């Protein structure tokens, strides 16, 4: 008697559903508000896929794991989700955490579509198993450096905490400014308190201070100290990593949190799909959706199309990255090999430098695009 071949792991263990594992920071020290927006986008897209008939008649199921911004927790979650038979992984916001997840997914040959993390070196070696929607840090932060120089800032201080992500950002900014006669002054937040930061800004004659620190602390305390130091009335505060995007920032800082430029990944105007999704996300979140919510929605939109076209076999999913052509909320999504980027990359999502309008803190002003 011949034994029939075993079905793929996703079909064998997931029953009637097609499972996607979702990595999301939902508890501290993770950036919880970003995680909530990311999950809202993921869940909305899954709901819409299932309303439209699922994946070949099978429901799409999201299996969520909280990474809490911890690389080891994320790696363990990847192991668990792989054993559960998920067809692919999605999500993650924190770059250092996504890097650990990507390395584990690569070793397990489990497709991973990273939603939000931007660290250029998401894996140490080129991999066929990982793709990314968010722009590489070198792309976005280069545009931020262009914005600073265009606004007349060439002596930039960075208040930085120890991290591969912050160190990478500092290096990108230094290279960008040095090429055009600018200077980056590093302030080690492992040694300085907010008052000392103010003194260093005066001593170094910096015209801008960038917050390369955790949120809410020490970022909020640094902003308050600088805003209320009369010596620094003309100093620009910037936050390229996007801390002012979320409502918690406005609640904690009020008017002090306005006019602080940051990066976000949205077009100047949303098309019909983006506008419809924005309305649905606003209802789901009870507030305006951040770009991170759109990243979550687009992640599932891409994976659903891949699953419909290529099935739930992991190898076939990974092989499909270069053939993806999907209309997302922020434009046509396609992946390619980009120089010095180790994963399949969407090059590029729209990038903006924006800030909160001092006259209307709930409104964002677009200062620079790329």
Image (cartoon, rainbow, N blue to C red):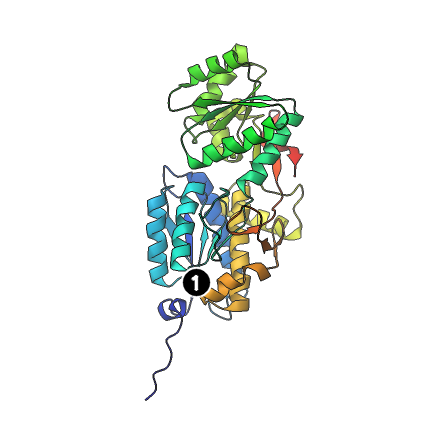
Location of the N terminus by quadrant is bottom left
Q: Is residue 269 left or right of residue 215?
A: right
Place of residue 272 in the rendered image (x, y in percent of width and height, measured from the top left): 66, 52
- For the question of whether residue 51 can be seen, the reply is no
Place of residue 137 in the rendered image (x, y in percent of width and height, measured from the top left): 53, 39
Which picture quadrant has residue 324?
Answer: bottom right
Q: Is residue 208 left or right of residue 95?
A: right
- For the question of whether residue 126 can be seen, the reply is yes
As helix, strand or loop, the secondary structure at mark 1 comes to: loop
Circle 1 residue: 87
Q: Is residue 225 left or right of residue 140?
A: left
Location of the C terminus by quadrant is top right
Report the residue that reaches farthest toward the bottom.
Answer: 1
Which picture quadrant has residue 108?
Answer: bottom left
Place of residue 266 in the rendered image (x, y in percent of width and height, measured from the top left): 61, 42
When the figure is inspected, residue 265 is found, relative to residue 335, above or below; the finding is above
Specify few, some or many for label 1: CA neighbours under 10 Å numbering under 14, 14-19, or 20 or more: many
Q: Nearer the viewer, residue 44 or 148?
A: 148
When the figure is inspected, residue 245 is found, relative to residue 278, above or below; the finding is above
Q: Total label count?
A: 1
Place of residue 368 in the rendered image (x, y in percent of width and height, measured from the top left): 65, 33
Which residue is depicted at the point 48% across and 35% down?
A: 168
Q: Nearer the viewer, residue 273 or 51?
A: 273
When the figure is inspected, residue 330 is found, relative to residue 225, above or below; the finding is below
């Amino acid at each position: 008697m011949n034994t029939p071949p075993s079905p793929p792991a996703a079909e064998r263990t997931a029953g009637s559903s097609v499972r996607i594992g979702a990595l999301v920071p939902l508890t501290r020290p993770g950036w919880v508000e970003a995680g909530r927006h990311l999950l809202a986008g993921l869940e909305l897209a899954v709901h819409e896929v299932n309303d439209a008939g699922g994946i070949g008649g099978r429901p799409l199921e999201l299996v969520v794991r909280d990474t809490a911004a911890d690389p080891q927790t994320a790696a363990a979650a990847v192991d668990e989700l792989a054993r559960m038979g998920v067809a692919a992984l999605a999500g993650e916001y924190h770059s250092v955490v996504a890097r650990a997840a990507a390395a584990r997914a690569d070793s397990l040959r489990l497709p991973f579509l990273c939603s939000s993390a931007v660290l250029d070196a998401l894996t140490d070696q080129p991999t066929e198993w990982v793709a990314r929607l968010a722009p590489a840090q070198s792309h976005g932060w280069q545009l931020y450096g262009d914005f600073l120089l265009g606004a007349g800032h060439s002596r930039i201080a960075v208040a930085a905490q120890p991290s591969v992500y912050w160190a990478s950002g500092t290096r990108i900014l230094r290279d960008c400014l040095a090429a055009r006669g600018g200077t980056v002054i590093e302030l080690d937040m492992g040694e300085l308190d907010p008052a000392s930061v103010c003194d260093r800004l005066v001593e170094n004659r910096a015209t801008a201070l960038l917050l390369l620190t955790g949120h809410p602390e020490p970022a909020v305390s640094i902003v308050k100290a600088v805003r209320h130091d009369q010596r620094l009335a003309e100093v620009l505060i910037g936050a390229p990593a996007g801390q002012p995007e979320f409502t918690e920032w406005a609640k904690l800082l009020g008017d002090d949190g306005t006019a602080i430029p940051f990066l976000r990944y949205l077009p100047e105007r949303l098309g019909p799909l983006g506008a419809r999704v924005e309305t649905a996300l606003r209802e789901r979140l009870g507030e305006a959706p951040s770009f991170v919510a759109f990243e979550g929605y687009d992640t599932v939109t891409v994976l659903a199309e891949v699953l419909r076209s290529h099935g739930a076999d992991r190898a076939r999913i990974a092989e499909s990255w270069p053939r993806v052509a999907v209309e997302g909320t922020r434009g046509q999504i396609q992946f390619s090999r980009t120089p010095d980027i180790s994963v399949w990359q969407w090059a590029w999502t729209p990038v903006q430098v924006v800030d909160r309008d001092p006259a209307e803190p709930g409104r964002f002003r677009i200062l620079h695009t790329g």
